Amino acid sequence: MREKIVTCPECKHEMTERGFKYFHIKKTHKMDYFTFMLKHGENLVKGKDYVVCKICRAKCARLGGGHLEKIHGKTCDEYLKEYPNSQLHCGDFSSKQRDIKRDQYKHDPALRQKAGKRSYKSEFWQMLPIPEPRAEEDYLPPPITNSIFTHEPSIEQAVILLFGQMCDKYNITIEQFWSHKFPDCKGLIKSKKKRDRYIPIYIEFEPKSSNVQKHKEINDGSWKKTSPLLLVCWEHDSKQLPKGIVVLELKTEIEKLRKIKV
C-alpha cells in the first residue's frame, strides 16, 4: 500500500505523511507535531488529541515509551511521583492504536507470528467474541497459581502444560518427547558462552519430586547416561535425590512471579 502524500503548509514541500509527521516538522521547523499543527489552525484538543509534558511543555500523543525515557531519562513511575495524577497519553491514543492493530491482524494473520508475545496476547484476547457476564456474581476469581490453572497441578500432564507456559523464561526449547520412557523429553538450553548455540538437556516431569524415585533408572544410576537431567515438578518434597539432578520447583517459581507483579 502506497503511503499518503501530504504538503507542508509552511514550506509547501511534498512528502509522505509519515516523513512529514515524524521527521520534517522536527528537523526543518524545530517544533513538535502538535505545536506545528495548532500553529496552522488544526483543531486539536488537549487531553483528547495530545498531552503536555510538565517538564519541558512538549506536546505528545504519549509520554511513556519514548519521550520521558529519551529526553528526560525518566520512567513513567518516576514522572508520576513528581507530577501525581498526570495524564501519560491522550484519550484517543489507545483506541487508535487498538483499531490500527485490529485492522492489521484482520487482513494479515501472518503478523501474529511476527508480533511480540505481549502484542499477540493482548490483541488476540481483545478479538475473542466472548460476552461479559451481566451479573457481578457470574465472574470468577483469578487463578490461585497466577498461571494458566485455577488450581495446583496434581498430574504429570498438568506440570508439562505449566512448564510449557514458562520454559521460554529459562531459555529452554523442547526438541523431542517420549512416551513410556525415562526421561520424558529432550530439550535444548541456550549456551551462556556462545551466542545462538544450544546444549542438550534431558527433562523429567513429576507432580512431586519424590515420585521420580519410582523409576529404576534413578535407583540403579543409569540416569547419568541422560545427563544433565532436569527434574521439573510442582512441589519439591524429597531430600534423597542423587547429586547432579537439577530440580525446578514450579510452585516456588510461580510465587516469585507473583511477587514481581505485585
Image (cartoon, rainbow, N blue to C red):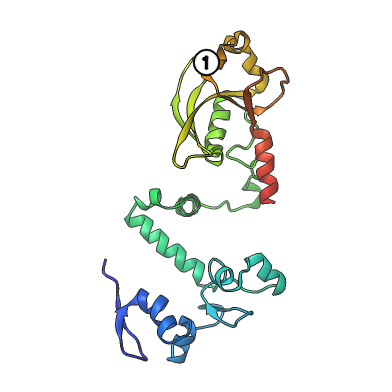
Residue at the image position 51 percent from the left and 21 percent from the top: 184
Q: Tell me the crowding category of disc 1: few under 14, some 14 to 19, or many 20 or more residues within 10 angstroms, Cα based.
A: few
Q: Which residue is mark 1?
A: 225
Q: How many marks overall?
A: 1
Rendered view: 231 above or below 49: above
Residue drawn at 41 percent across, 59 percent down:
102
Q: Nearer the viewer, residue 116 or 145?
A: 116
Look at the picture and state if 158 lies above or below 10. Answer: above
Where is residue 124 drawn, in percent x and y?
45, 51
Instruction: Answer above or below: position of 143 versus 176.
Output: below
Q: Is residue 112 above or below residue 168?
A: below
On the image, which quarter does residue 78 sit in? bottom right
Which quadrant would residue 206 be assigned to in this image?
Answer: top right
Q: In the figure, residue 146 lies in which quadrant?
A: top right
**Does residue 62 appear to the left or right of 9 in the view shown?**
right
**Secondary structure of the residue carrying numbered label 1:** helix
State the residue lying farthest toward the left: 2
User: Which residue is more in the foreground, 170 or 92?
Assistant: 170
